[in-house]
Every structure is written in C-alpha cells, then in structure tokens.
Amino acid sequence: MLPLLLSLYAKVLHPELLQQDKQLLLPGLMLQQSSLGMQVLFLGALLSAIMSTASGSMLAPAAILSENIFRPFYQNITVKKLLQLSRLSVLLVAGVSLGFALMRSNIYELVSESSALSLVSLFVPMVAGIYLPRTGSIAAMLSMVAGMGVWLGALALGTVIKPLVYGLGASALGLGVGNVLFPRSHKYQFNQ
C-alpha cells in the first residue's frame, strides 16, 4: 500500500517526475526527497523484492515443467536424474525469460504478456479439470500447446484482434479436440 501512496504523492506534488520514464517515478521520488539512510533502505528493499520475485518466477514454472510435463515421459526416473531434469528446466525457463526480457524494455508489457501466457495456456485446462470429469491429461496438454502456439503466432503477426482472444479460442478448441480424439481412459493417460 505504501508504494501506491508514494506514487500518488509523486504524481500530485511532483508532476515533473512524470516527464521521465514512468517506471522510475518512485525511485526518482525517493532519490530526490529522502535522506541517504532512507535511500539505502528503499533501494535495498527494492532489490530484495525484485530478486525474490525473479527467483520465484523462474523456479515455479521450472518445477511444474520438470514434475508435471517432463517426468511423465520417464517411467522409473531416479532422484538424481529428476534433480538434473529440474536443473535443466530452470535453465530452460531462465533462457525463455531472458528472451522475453530482451524483446521488451517496459515492465508493464512483460507483466501483461506473462499474464496472457497464463490465460491462454493454463486457464482452459484448469477449469476443464475442475468442472469436466472426462478431461484427460492429453487433452489438457493439447490445449496448452495449442493456446500458447496460436497466441505466439498471433503476437508475431500483429493481428488487429488481441492475440489473447485467438490463444484462448485455440486453447478451448485444443481441449475439445483432445477430449474427442483421446477420451479419458487408462490407455492414453500419463503415468501418475
């Protein structure tokens, strides 16, 4: 709540700070209006929050990738191999994250794209898993791949309609096709 109040304060009492990069509004206010001790505390807290968010943002998808996506393809994987798979997943997620960060310089664009990616790849399979008892894991995987693939394609093409709409539609279509072609049965499911 405090960063929001400080940003509102900066906007009302120091509008000249808005002429700069808007991402630097709060740091600029703290550097101009506070003492050295407060600046050190603020920048330390800011760096801590950024590093904590970055590590969580890389470790969570890497764990999901290694445990839920890659692990079912290996029947009797040892703990040592699973650890190596998890470490490779962290490197893969870090590489993809670095690619996204190098393509965009605005933090707001990066946050909106990460939210859109979650919507087009995870929302439909999650809702289907909760409310549709016949949804299988292959249909969910097809939904995720279709949604993400179409969203990335529409993003690259620069469509008039938001790419999010295309990705969400493709995710729903992928789930429907997956449920028709691979109905839930033990024959087509990944090992639990």
Image: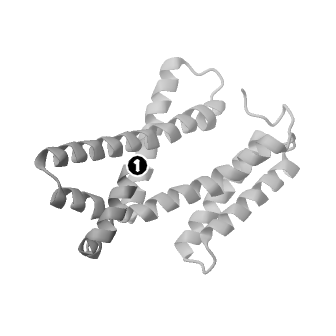
Task: Tell whether 88 sits left or right of 37.
Answer: right
Q: Residue at x 27, y 69 (%)?
A: 13
| Position in image of residue 182 (x %, y %) | 84, 45
| Position in image of residue 185 (x %, y %) | 87, 35
Farthest bottom residue in view: 160
Residue 21 appears in view: no
Task: Tell whether 16 sits left or right of 173.
Answer: left
Farthest left residue in view: 36
Q: Residue at x 73, y 33 (%)?
A: 190
What is the basis of the colouring in this image?
one colour
Q: In front: 168, or 41? A: 41
Question: Of the residues shown, which amino acid type is indicated by label 1?
Answer: Gly
Residue 71 versus residue 46 in the image, above or below: above
Q: Residues within 10 Å of mark 1 (few under 14, many from 20)?
A: few
Query: Where, by quadrant of the figure, is residue 157 drawn?
Result: bottom right
Query: Where, by quadrant of the figure, is residue 52 drawn?
Result: top left
Residue 88 versus residue 23 in the image, above or below: above
Q: In front: 162, or 10? A: 10
Residue 75 appears in view: yes
| Position in image of residue 189 (x %, y %) | 78, 34
Q: Residue at x 62, y 66 (%)?
A: 164
Query: Where, by quadrant of the figure, is residue 56 drawn?
Result: top left
| Position in image of residue 133 (x %, y %) | 86, 39
Task: Tell whether 32 sits left or right of 91.
Answer: left
Q: Residue at x 61, y 70 (%)?
A: 163
Residue 154 versus residue 57 in the image, above or below: below
User: For the C terminus, which image quadrant?
Assistant: top right
Residue identified by numbered label 1 = 95
Residue 98 versus residue 17 in the image, above or below: above
Element at badge 1? helix
